[in-house]
């Protein structure tokens, strides 16, 4: 069972054989809720295993979603202009290169060359009026 001090530090407890190990969860400030509501999308960056990953956060239908900014088909960033991820209807995420369309709610590609693939979701939390991206270190 996890010790309270590990949980208070934002760690997840993992059992590895008979050893209890802690994996630290990093919280990275991304933006305020007000900024996200005003813009609709916000770009940010996280470090995963010493590699920078571009991410974006969406506000859609009173919900918040966060994904890695990477097309599953080509590996390029989805947007062609800063903070522009929605298609013309504002109801789907669109890849700027080949027009693939992804559902906002789960990142699933519903049209295009990566049909059936999904965007990689990013964990986040909302504290007070701020959004933090979460990732394991």
Image: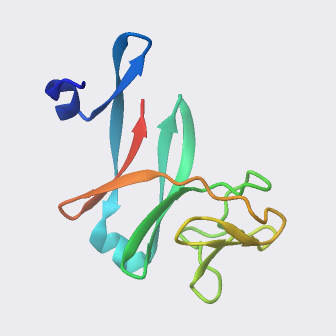
Residue 114 at what x, y percent from top left?
79, 62
Is residue 106 toward the left or the right of residue 115 in the image?
left
Location of the N terminus by quadrant is: top left
Q: Quadrant of residue 16?
A: top left
Q: How is the image coloured?
A: rainbow
Residue 92 at what x, y percent from top left?
61, 78
Residue 132 at what x, y percent from top left?
33, 52
Q: Residue furthest right?
A: 113
Residue shown at 74% from the left, 51% from the top: 75
Position above or below: 104 against 14: below
Q: Nearer the viewer, residue 76 or 17?
A: 17
Is residue 96 toward the left or the right of residue 121 in the image?
right
Is residue 130 toward the left or the right of residue 28 in the image?
left
Q: Quadrant of residue 62?
A: bottom left
Residue 74 at what x, y percent from top left?
79, 54
Q: Residue furthest bottom?
A: 89
């Amino acid at each position: 069972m996890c010790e309270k001090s590990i949980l208070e530090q934002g760690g997840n407890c993992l059992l590895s054989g008979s050893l209890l190990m802690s994996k630290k969860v990093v919280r990275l400030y991304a933006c305020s809720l007000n900024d996200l509501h005003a813009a609709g999308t916000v770009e940010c960056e996280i470090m995963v295993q010493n590699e920078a990953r571009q991410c974006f956060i969406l506000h859609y239908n009173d919900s918040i979603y966060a994904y890695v900014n990477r097309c599953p088909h080509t590996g390029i960033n989805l947007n062609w202009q800063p903070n522009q991820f929605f298609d013309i209807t504002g109801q789907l995420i669109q890849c700027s290169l080949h027009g693939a369309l992804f559902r906002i709610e789960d990142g699933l590609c519903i049209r295009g060359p990566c049909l059936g693939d999904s965007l990689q979701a990013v964990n986040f939390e909302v504290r007070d009026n701020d959004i933090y991206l979460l990732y394991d270190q």
